[in-house]
Amino acid sequence: MSRFAMIAFDADDTLWHNERLYVAAQATFRDLLAHYHSPEWIDERLFQTEMRNLQHFGYGIKAFALSMIETAVELTEGRIGGNDIQTLIDAARTMLTADVELLDGVPETLDVLAGSYELMVITKGDLRDQEVKIERSGLARYFRHVEIVSDKHRANYETLLRRHAIAPEQFLMVGNSLRSDILPVLELGAHAVYIPHHLTWAHEAGTAPEAHPGYYELAHMGELPALLARLEG
Amino acid sequence: MSRFAMIAFDADDTLWHNERLYVAAQATFRDLLAHYHSPEWIDERLFQTEMRNLQHFGYGIKAFALSMIETAVELTEGRIGGNDIQTLIDAARTMLTADVELLDGVPETLDVLAGSYELMVITKGDLRDQEVKIERSGLARYFRHVEIVSDKHRANYETLLRRHAIAPEQFLMVGNSLRSDILPVLELGAHAVYIPHHLTWAHEAGTAPEAHPGYYELAHMGELPALLARLEG
């Protein structure tokens, strides 16, 4: 019998590329405001707006678009033009309709693991956007459950484990965000595999735990089956 | 033993007032554009934008805000000012932070029914916004399950019934939208109680079924216990 009753995966930048869509939109945003401010100040103010709006707007592309628009109005003291606003809305629509591009090794790894484990996705963001991406990814068949949550605090994981009747020690989470995928899961006494992605939003940063018994770091998704074999062995 | 394994409630304008927040924001929107166009044309164009954006933006306040902003840019041919854009974002923030005002008779009815039935909420819209409203409503304790979905088509209900292992004939849905709460549920062979709300978004309209065996219409939530007593009897 397996040691893990459920292996859960973050989606954005764990299964497929995502942050680069934000990076591209933010480059457009920076260009629009280049006559007004330095790139560094534009980035800083956008991040401040996002953090201020997080409690009301939540995560995801629509919240990001509203924060870009609001920051543009603030940074231009209301002089931003309607066509530039339209450019920002179009950038959001481009993000929402972008092709889903899987990270290397993802389908192969899921194909191996799905034979031995129950797999789940746990992702945050806009409900519809995440559903569409799971469908477009072609990965839906590997997952017994897809959970789209408004945030990934310890309490959100507790609720999910209770709902699926899984003990923390039988749960393993895989993701690229220390803040959202790793630290709250370890706090619960579950296991977490951190696979860093070269693009990660500043908000998702955290400090990797040192010598925590349930913590593992991998360079690549393709290394996951070997890690699991070792843990089971 | 009860005839119904689960009674599910829509949330917006079934448990608490919601559409009036949209009506108020739309009045602000109409005022901003009053120098450019007639109120009727402004309303029509906003509705068109919302329908066009629905597949990408989904339901909820953030999508509504983006559609208002986009329509304002279009209807002013880009001449909308940054301060007016800020007014629209502020209108969205006002909606997201509004007090939850329960409809008459809701807590009393839930209190009665929770003694005999498993109750569930099935609502669509922004994940975080709906979660916050359920928490603020003070009604969370009555519901065994809260399901926030991206849409309420027949397939969404099928997925929910399967997940909770409920046969359609043991399921009853209560709501104010013929399109979202009633018709897809009846199609599945389940039961549906339509409680019209005097404010309902045009998109949610539908034709009430005639003489459908699982269909009931009530004027008021307070009439629900008596209807259920009759159905059980």
Image: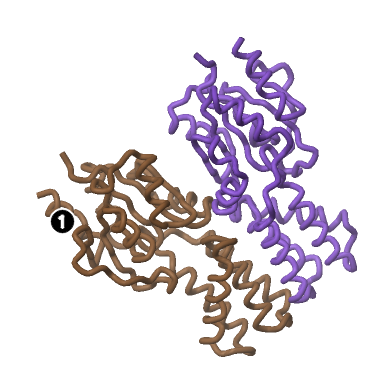
Chain colours: A brown, B purple
Instruction: Answer above or below: position of A81 versus B141.
Output: below
Disc 1 crowd, CA 10 A, few/some/many (<14, 14-19, 20+): few
Q: Quadrant of residue B39?
A: bottom right
Chain identifier of the residue bearing label 1 in the image:
A
Of residues B232 and A90, the one drawn nearer to the viewer in this rendering: B232
A119 left or right of B7? left
B82 left or right of A181? right
Of residues A195 and B113, the one drawn nearer to the viewer in this rendering: B113
Q: Which residue is mark 1?
A: A226
x and y, in percent, of residue A129 in the image: 52, 54
x and y, in percent, of residue B81 in the image: 77, 76
Number of residue marks: 1
> In the rendered image, is residue B183 in sight?
no
Residue positioned 76% across, 56% down in the render: B46
x and y, in percent, of residue A178 in the image: 34, 66
Instruction: Answer above or below: position of B200 versus B3.
Output: below
Residue positioned 80% across, 62% down in the render: B29
B6 left or right of B200? left
> Which residue lies most toward the top here?
B233
B13 left or right of A17? right
Residue positioned 72% across, 16% down in the render: B211
Q: Quadrant of the C terminus of chain B?
A: top right
The kind of secondary structure element at disc 1 is helix
For badge 1, the amino acid type reads Ala
x and y, in percent, of residue B4 in the image: 54, 20
Q: Quadrant of residue A29?
A: bottom right
Of residues B198 and B72, the one drawn nearer to the viewer in this rendering: B198
Residue positioned 81% across, 61% down in the render: B28
